[in-house]
Amino acid sequence: MASSPEEQFVTTATENYETTCWGCGLRLLLPSRASVFKCGWCGAITNQNKRKCDDKCFRWRQLRDRCFVSVVILFMLFVIFGGVWAVYPHAFSVSLLCGVFHSIVTTILAVATISFFSFASFRCAGTPPSILWGSYPTIGKGDLEDYTFCNYCSKPKSPGTHHCRSCGKCIKDMDHHCPFIGNCVGAANHYHFIAFLISAVISTIYVSIMSVYTGMHIWPPLTYSFGRSNQAASSLAWRVMSEIFLSFLRSALFLSARGIVLVYLFISSVSVMIGLSVLLWQQLFYIYEGRTYLSHLSSGDGKKDCQNLVRFFGFPYSVSRFLPKFRVTQKRHIKRNIHVM
Ligand SMILES: [Zn+2]
Ligand SMILES: [Zn+2]
Ligand SMILES: [Zn+2]
């Protein structure tokens, strides 16, 4: 189970120093004035160093996230509509079948990428389980095992739950906060985030291939100016290469607007593809280890198993995640009167 560094240095309450457990409300006797301790009854971890927190930069983080999300949405729209405008005339000039084929591929990739992005970005990343707390004997033995208390939300945090200062709430199984989707990646949207990365990587590969293919057909003709030369073979090869490169640059001056868009599409899609591929590889590796990015930072090696990937992408799970959920709140956060033992 993942645990933060502070949770690894807990002491079990026994005697001498009197304090109160936030989880069950019992008075505990500690051997010394420990700042972090675990309740011997309910199992909740109390950190007395942490006090009520106010986050003054919350609005700035929200503004930053909205700017990033707007840029990502504009970029996706530019790639889709710019790509259609630049590539389709050539695709349809080859044959009607070729044009229709690329229309279908573009539609599937665009719909998949935008849908997964929307799911990852705009749905809640994961609500921590609601649980009763604060009152003995309502709280039974071990009911709050390894729970900690969030001083921002004033609620219990289940193991694996972390408070995100950008989202301003606790996120169950939080992986990381991604400013590009303006949301945390957690238990409820991790699958959509990975699906978005896969869809975006495939889309950028498709866009870069189509940009090169179309660019080769509409690029202005190259003009070479090789003179007679008695140079050695190595310097001759260098001269040929530099002349090809220069003629390529000269011809670029005569590029049409469609050609310029294709060059931009190729450079941007290859750059984004490299970045997203690295992120996707890293994410898949953490899933293979059965961990999240945050639990990877706080603990050692995980249990590597391909079943973790199968479970993550499992068919029954993938269908159920798309269906609307009518969540029934069975328990609520209720602060009861503290009983004294
Ligand atoms: Zn307790
Ligand atoms: Zn919180
Ligand atoms: Zn967040």
Image: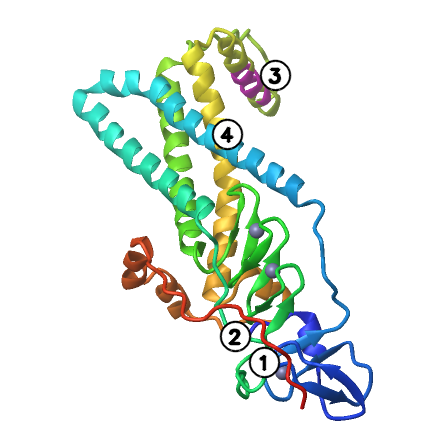
Numbered disc 1: secondary structure: loop
Instruction: Judge whether residue 299 can be spotted in this image.
Output: no
The amino acid beneath tag 3 is Gln
* Label placed on residue 135: 1
Q: Disc 3 vs disc 4: Cβ atoms closer than 8 Å? A: no
Q: Is residue 22 above or below residue 180?
A: below
In the shown orientation, is residue 96 left or right of residue 24? left
Mark 2: C-beta under 8 Å from nearest atom of ligand 1: no
Spatial distance from mark 3 to mark 4, Cα to Cα?
Answer: 39 Å
User: Between disc 2 and disc 4, whose residue precedes?
Assistant: 2
Disc 4 element: helix
Q: Residues within 10 Å of mark 4 (few under 14, many from 20)?
A: some
For the residues labelled 2 and 3, say whether their Cβ atoms are less than 8 Å apart. no
Q: Which residues are magenta?
A: 238-245
Q: Check disc 1 and give the amino acid type.
A: Ser
Circle 3 residue = 231
Q: Secondary structure at mark 3?
A: loop
The residue sitting at the bottom extreme is 15
Q: Nearer the viewer, mark 4 or mark 1?
A: 1
Identity of the residue drawn at 60% across and 52% down: 168
Specify the label residue 268 is tagged with. 4
Foreground tag (3 vs 1): 1
How far from the left and from the top, in percent, is residue 332? 48, 68
Which residue is most to the left? 97
Provide the residue designation for mark 2.
132
Expressed as whole percent of the image width and height from the top left, the position of residue 339 reads 64, 84
Is the CB–ligand 3 distance for label 4 below 8 Å? no
Inter-mark Cα distance, 2 to 1 = 8 Å
